[in-house]
Image (cartoon, rainbow, N blue to C red):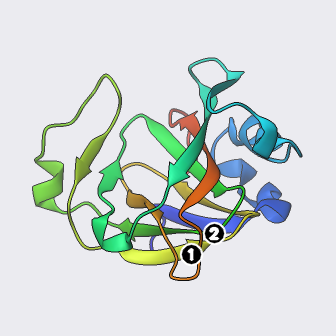
Amino acid sequence: MSEKHIFGKLAESEKYLGINPLFEKAFAFLKRTDLAALPAGRQEIDGDRCWANVIDATLKPCAECKLEAHHRYIDIQMPVTGPEVIGVAEMDEAARALPFNEKDDYVVYDGPSEPVRLQPGDFAIFLPPGAHAPCGRPADGPEKIRKVVVKVLADGTCG
């Protein structure tokens, strides 16, 4: 792991508020008790500076999960209804050379990653340009879960 990947418990999220000035709003949203009841799709938090994407995800074997990375936005990912495995990696030079979708702020590619298991109540923070491969199915886990990805504008990130 590196400083580009942070893992924690939602109950202890105050430890991470200094990373970005928008994290207070992001974690306040995640602490809502009705995340499972929200409709899938975009949920507004602070316009284009911070929003959540509520996803009904179909999980797949980790070997089939693609790495992704962002430039402008930090991801805070949290499973809501079941466990998820997310692969983590550093972008190598070959990945950095791939065409980047500036409009939608992502690049997707194949590569090795280290699996990290998240349970409901756990979260992962992915700081640019740290790569992550979401939606991995644990061996003992369900095929579908509800998860939330909060997108936080990286401008102003501390450290």
The residue type indicated by label 2 comes to Pro
Answer whether labels 1 and 2 touch (C-beta < 8 Å).
yes
Between marks 1 and 2, how big is the CA–CA gap? 7 Å
Res 93 → quadrant: bottom left
x 36%, y 39%: residue:
71
State left or right for residue 153 relative to residue 54: left
Q: Which residue is mark 2?
A: 83
Res 25 → quadrant: top right
Rendered-image quadrant of the N terminus? bottom left
Locate residue 123, reporting x and y percent: 66, 60
Locate residue 52, reporting x and y percent: 63, 34
x 35%, y 27%: residue:
104
Closer-to-camera residue (158/10): 10
Q: Name the N-terminal-most of marks 1 and 2.
A: 2
Looking at the image, the residue that sits furthest to the bottom is 139
Locate residue 113, reporting x and y percent: 33, 73
x 41%, y 48%: residue:
128
Closer-to-camera residue (51/127): 51
State left or right for residue 158 relative to residue 96: right
Helix, strand or loop status at disc 1: strand
Q: Which residue is mark 1?
A: 117
